[in-house]
Image (cartoon, rainbow, N blue to C red):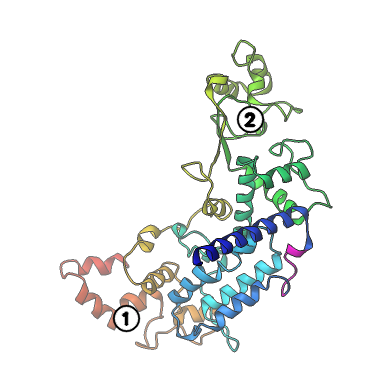
């Protein structure tokens, strides 16, 4: 009996999931995410979770763990079949940000580090909190990936038939005003998605010569062509002569000589080479992952300097890790910091009444801190230890 019930439950879940996708394809309003406070009540779900937590009893590390593991994941189900409104994503971030820094209904605590920094990857010196709109796009990229790699699936055939408009979707993907919200969302992220698609040359029948990334330079040849007008429907195999060699005249007349020679040295594709293989440029295995799709949208051009890998891999209490992280960012709430922000009267240390209460003063120069370091650091290294920070 329990086995049959489990089967029925599993079948029901599959039917619901398929129904949602199909409804999104055909543009039914019942699954469109409506403005804030309506439809899926994502905000209510987040608020209900927060109401069960004693926020005042949680450390910053505890709030960070709950924020990343629970609050961030609540809207993931809806992100897999629809584009959430920007106002909804912003409200989710606002709630998450307030919870992380310990805000209450009566008071607002200092937000020591900017939210944009908190949401960057941990290996770049940040907390790795997922931004809702980027995560939403990552889930939609997965749908695009399946659309390309599994074109024979029924839902893919429906999309190709309804929106392909007799074109290769890799060449021309667009949306009309009357298309479904799901398709509009997919076309909106197509350009960014396409930047991560790479190809391994096989017989050349499925690779677009101009649009796809298959050449040694790692970019599409359309970006380097010296021609004003090109045939964007051309496949790699179309540039091979009947004798099985590259069409050298075509290459040299349409590409700069350097790039034409790079293509020419590649063995010309033939039928015995097998099928062309598509890959995802965001991973070493060339397999698509949600995490790599998210990372492709959320990377800092110049990571914050520091040995962040050593920090986050340290085998110690998480609350001490987050304390060291805040210290490395120079964002401890000292009197000196309060004074600079205009929320404190004096930057002087209230313990010694002599020096400014900076981070270095609190952790090294304050008499009690100095006494602790003298007991911890070997006597033959104590002078080097203190001079290192001067």
Please name the residue shown 20% across and 77% down the image.
375
Disc 2 crowd, CA 10 A, few/some/many (<14, 14-19, 20+): some
Where disc 2 sits, the SS reads loop
Reading the chain from its start, which is encountered first: label 2 or label 1?
2
The one nearer the camera, 124 or 88, is 88
Q: Quadrant of residue 380?
A: bottom left
Foreground label between 2 and 1 = 2
Q: Is residue 234 visible?
A: yes
Where disc 1 sits, the SS reads loop
Left or right: residue 268 compared with residue 351: right
Q: Is residue 147 above or below residue 184?
A: above
Q: Is residue 167 above or below residue 62?
A: above
Left or right: residue 116 compared with residue 354: right
**Residue position marked by numbered label 2 in the rendering:** 206
Magenta stretch?
A: 30-37
**Residue position marked by numbered label 1 in the rendering:** 366
The one nearer the camera, 63 or 243, is 243
Disc 1 crowd, CA 10 A, few/some/many (<14, 14-19, 20+): some
Q: Is residue 131 visible?
A: no
The CA span between labels 2 and 1 is 69 Å
Q: Quadrant of the C terminus?
A: bottom left
Q: Could you tell me residue 10's position as x and y percent?
A: 57, 61
Q: Could you tell me residue 184's position as x and y percent?
A: 75, 52
Q: Could you tell me residue 222's position as x and y percent?
A: 67, 32
Please name the residue shown 72% across and 26% down the image.
227
């Amino acid at each position: 009996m329990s086995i049959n019930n489990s089967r029925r439950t599993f079948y029901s879940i599959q039917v619901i999931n398929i129904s949602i996708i199909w409804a999104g394809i055909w543009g039914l309003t019942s699954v469109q995410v409506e403005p804030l406070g309506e439809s899926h009540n994502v905000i209510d779900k987040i608020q209900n979770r927060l109401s069960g937590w004693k926020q005042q009893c949680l450390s910053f590390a505890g709030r960070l763990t709950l924020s990343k593991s629970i609050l961030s994941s609540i809207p993931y189900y809806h992100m897999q079949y629809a584009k959430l409104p920007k106002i909804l994503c912003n409200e989710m971030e606002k709630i998450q940000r307030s919870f992380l820094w310990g805000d209450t209904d009566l008071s607002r605590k200092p937000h020591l580090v900017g939210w944009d920094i908190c949401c960057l990857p941990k290996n770049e010196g940040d907390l790795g909190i997922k931004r809702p709109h980027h995560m939403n796009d990552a889930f939609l990229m997965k749908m695009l990936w399946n659309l390309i790699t599994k074109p024979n699936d029924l839902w893919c055939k429906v999309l190709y038939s309804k929106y392909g408009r007799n074109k290769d979707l890799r060449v021309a993907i667009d949306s009309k005003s009357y298309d479904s919200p799901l398709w509009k969302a997919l076309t909106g992220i197509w350009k960014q998605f396409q930047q991560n698609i790479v190809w391994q040359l096989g017989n050349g029948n499925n690779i677009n010569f101009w649009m796809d990334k298959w050449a040694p330079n790692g970019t599409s040849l359309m970006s380097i062509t010296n021609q004003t007008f090109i045939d964007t429907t051309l496949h790699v195999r179309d540039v091979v002569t009947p004798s099985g060699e590259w069409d050298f005249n075509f290459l040299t007349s349409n590409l700069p000589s350097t790039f034409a020679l790079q293509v020419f040295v590649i063995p010309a594709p033939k039928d015995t080479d097998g099928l062309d293989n598509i890959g995802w440029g965001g991973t070493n295995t060339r397999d698509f992952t949600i995490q790599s799709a998210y990372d492709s949208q959320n990377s800092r051009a110049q990571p914050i300097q520091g040995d962040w890998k050593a920090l986050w891999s340290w085998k110690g209490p998480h609350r001490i890790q987050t304390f060291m992280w805040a210290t490395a960012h120079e964002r401890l709430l000292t009197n000196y910091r309060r004074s600079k922000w205009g929320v404190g009267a004096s930057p002087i240390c209230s313990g010694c009444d002599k020096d400014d209460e900076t981070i270095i003063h609190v952790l090294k120069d304050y008499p009690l801190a100095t006494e602790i370091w003298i007991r911890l650091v070997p006597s033959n290294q104590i002078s080097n230890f203190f001079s290192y920070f001067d």
